[in-house]
Amino acid sequence: MNKQELRAGGLVAKPGEKVQGFMTVTGTDYQMPATLVNGTGEGKTILLTAGIHGGEYPCIQAAIELGRELQPEKVKGQIIIVHIVNPPAFNARLSYINPLDEKNINRLFPGDPKGTISQQIAWFITQELQGQADFYVDMHGGDIHEELPPYAYYPGVASAEVVAASRAVVVKLDVDFIVKSSATTGAYNSAAIRGLPCILMERGSSGLWSPREVELYKKDLLTVLGVQGLIEGYDSVPDKESMEITKAVYLDSTCSGCWYPAVKVKETVKKGQKIGEIRDFFGEVLETFYADFDSIILFVTSSLAIGQGDAIITYGI
Ligand SMILES: [Zn+2]
């Protein structure tokens, strides 16, 4: 029998209880909608965060629905779900940044308790949420200007044990690709470096969402909970094999203007093939991009507008 209270951001769930409400980021008045599910049986503590980027709707809706549907009496362990980490961006229909300080929360981990609000949010997630978790899922999708297939990352910069424990979960998901990440400052990358097994999920594109995408998102989240032993009946293998990407190139724009991709997501490209170009507002080509090796396209920015330093394409093999 589980006897532990589950506490996070001012919310408290007793054993066998589910609590929904707003978490408050310590030392601020910043609030995030969340669900705490404290199971009747003992088990792991799993953290799910959605909406670090406010324009990624399938993950946010999946978090809302899962928060309503999970029942403590069917859970062994504890589940923390943050439905939207970045409500200011969600409310303003903004991609990537938090409008309160114009920072991308997902580039600020592990955060800073004395920094700007986004740095404080990252610090709170690191200390109070990841700090009590045994496994972490950071839920994303194609933001308002992003086109991508369903895929999931596992951390590549961490101890061999953490990498293996993260990969063991990601291979169970119903996604097209699984990608080994070399990043370090994202919410899950930072967690992995500190010893917490974790993954990042991507599903949905271009500021859209559908009930079908939300169902598939929830199915994968239930698989994670099943594989981690919190719920029964969801630890089956995926319907299809995912292609594993171990070498990826993340191309950023070196100038601002108009972006014209020459490829689509999931398209295979040859070394030296043109994959897109940036032109100025008069149609003159400013920069042309080519693939460095035979690969598959994982992500394409879908907006015509492009700023200097913006991500434009990811490809890998
Ligand atoms: Zn995102």
Image: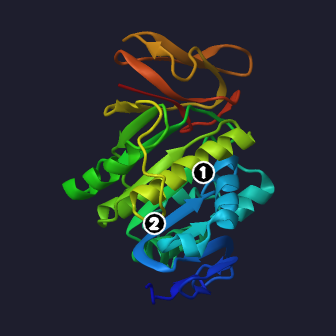
Q: Name the mark on residue 94.
A: none
Which residue, given by chain and number where applicable, does mark 2 sit on?
A: 230
> Does the Cβ of the disc 1 residue fall within 8 Å of ligand 1?
no
Which residue, given by chain and number where applicable, does mark 1 sit on?
A: 218
Q: Is residue 123 above or below residue 287?
A: below
Quadrant where the image shows the N terminus: bottom left
Q: Position of residue 200 (x, y in %)?
A: 47, 50
Q: Nearer the viewer, mark 2 or mark 1?
A: 2
Q: Is residue 228 above or below residue 142?
A: below
Q: Dot 2, crowdedness within 10 Å: few (<14), some or many (≥20)? A: many
Residue at the right extreme, as displayed: 92
Question: As drawn, is 69 to the left or to the right of 120?
Answer: right
Quadrant where the image shows the C terminus: top left
Q: Amino acid at mark 1?
A: Lys
Query: How many numbered markers are drawn?
Result: 2
Q: Is residue 139 above or below residue 246?
A: below
